[in-house]
Image: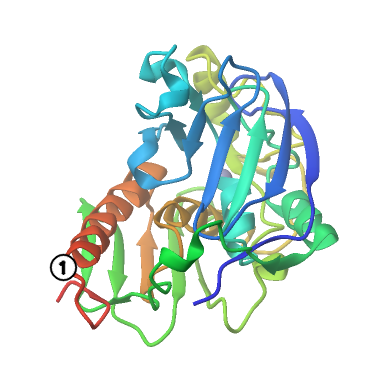
Amino acid sequence: MTNYTLGANFERSGIGLHSGITTTVRVLPAVARTGRYFVRVDLPGMPVIPARVEAVSTTMLSTQLRAGNGENSANFSDSEVTVGTVEHLLAALAGSGVDDACIEIDGSELPLLDGSALAWVKAIQEVGIVESELPQNSSNLSPLASPMFVGEPIWVCRDDVFVAALPAPMTRFTYGIDFENPAIGNQWYSWTPEQEHFADAIAPARTFGLANQVDQLRDRGLIKGGSLENALVCGDQGWLNPPLRFSNEPVRHKLLDLVGDLSLLGKFPVAHFLAYKASHNLHIQLARLLARQIGAWDVSRQSSAVIGN
Ligand SMILES: [Zn+2]
C-alpha cells in the first residue's frame, strides 16, 4: 500500500467553537508512516500529539486529543497539552486520502471556519496530494501492510443508539439521525469513498444545533465561538439561517464527524461503518475496539489481515 501526503504547506486561521479563541493552523507534508499528528508550536518544546485513538482525552461535543508521555512533553502534565475539535480537519485529510501530515497549531482548539470541512478540503486540493517520501533508513522497514478487513460485526450500543463495523467488500459509511424537530426529522445517508468524492458529498455539510440548547451550552462555558456564521441552528419554527447546502445536511455532517473520529485508526479498515443517533463518545468507543483488534493483528503477524477472526 502506498501512503500519501500533501504537495506543499497550507495555512488557515479562525476561531474555535468552544474556546472562542483564534488560532492559526499550518499543515505540512510528512514522511511515510508518520501518520497525521499535531504539534503545539505555541508551547515550549513544541509537544507532539498523534492523531491516534490512544490520544483521545475527551469526547464532549467534539473530540479532543492529549499528548502522551513523549520526550517533548516532559515539561507538562498530560492534561495540559491538548488539541480540541480535531474532527473536521482530520476528516478532510482522511477523506481526501492524506495519510501523513504534520499539523502545527498555535493554540488548543482548531478553527471551526464555516462549521464544515469545505475550507480544509479546498486547501488540500490547492496544494495537491503526492506519494509520501520514505523515511531515512527505510531499507529496514517491512512493506506496508495491506488493508485490514473487518471479519465479523463489532459494535457499541446504548439503548437505541449504536455504532457498528460490519464485514463488507469495500469501505462504506452509513449514518442515521432522528429528531423530534420536524425540520430535521429522520435522515439517513450512505457514503462510499470509491463512488463519491468526500469533497462533494460530505465536506460542505455544516455543524448544526438546536436553538433551545444554545443557552444551556453557553451557560456551561461551551460554544463561545459558535454563531449563525459557523453553525446551522434549528428553532421550533425551522432553520434560523437557511438555506441548507443539502436537504439532509445534518446527517451528512454527522457522517463527517464519524469519518474524522475513525480517521484516528490511521487508514480506514475495510468495513461498512453504520451509526444511528450516535455521538463522538460512541464513535471513539468503536474506534478503541477496532484499534485493539488491529493491535492484536499487528502483534500476531497473521498472513490474512482480517479483524475479528
Ligand atoms: Zn462536527
Q: Nearer the viewer, residue 17 or 53?
A: 53
Q: Give the left or right position of residue 65, taking residue 128 as reference.
A: left
Residue nearest the viewer, comparing 134 with 178: 134
x 51%, y 52%: residue? 34
- Camera-nearest residue between 207 and 8: 8
Q: Position of residue 28 (x, y in %)?
A: 71, 46
Task: Tell me: residue 276, above or below residue 111.
Answer: below
Seen at 41% across and 65% down, the residue is 140
Q: Position of residue 260 (x, y in %)?
A: 51, 52
Q: Is residue 35 above or below residue 226?
A: below
Q: Quadrant of ligand 1?
A: top right
The residue lying toward the viewer, choosing from 72 and 10, is: 72
Tell me where residue 263 appears, x and y as whole percent: 47, 56
**Is residue 41 something one can see in this rendering?**
yes
In the rendered view of the protein, which quadrant contains the C terminus? bottom left
Horizontal and vertical percent position of residue 274: 37, 67
Residue type at numbered disc 1: Ser
What colouring style does the render use? Answer: rainbow
Q: Is residue 101 left or right of residue 77?
A: right
Give the labeled residue for mark 1.
300
295 relative to 146, above or below:
above
Location of residue 85 by image quarter: top right
Residue ID at (69%, 18%): 21
Within-10-Å neighbours for mark 1: few <14, some 14–19, many 20+ = few
Asked if residue 62 shows in the view, the reply is: no
Residue 218 is left or right of residue 15, and the answer is: left
Q: Secondary structure at mark 1?
A: helix
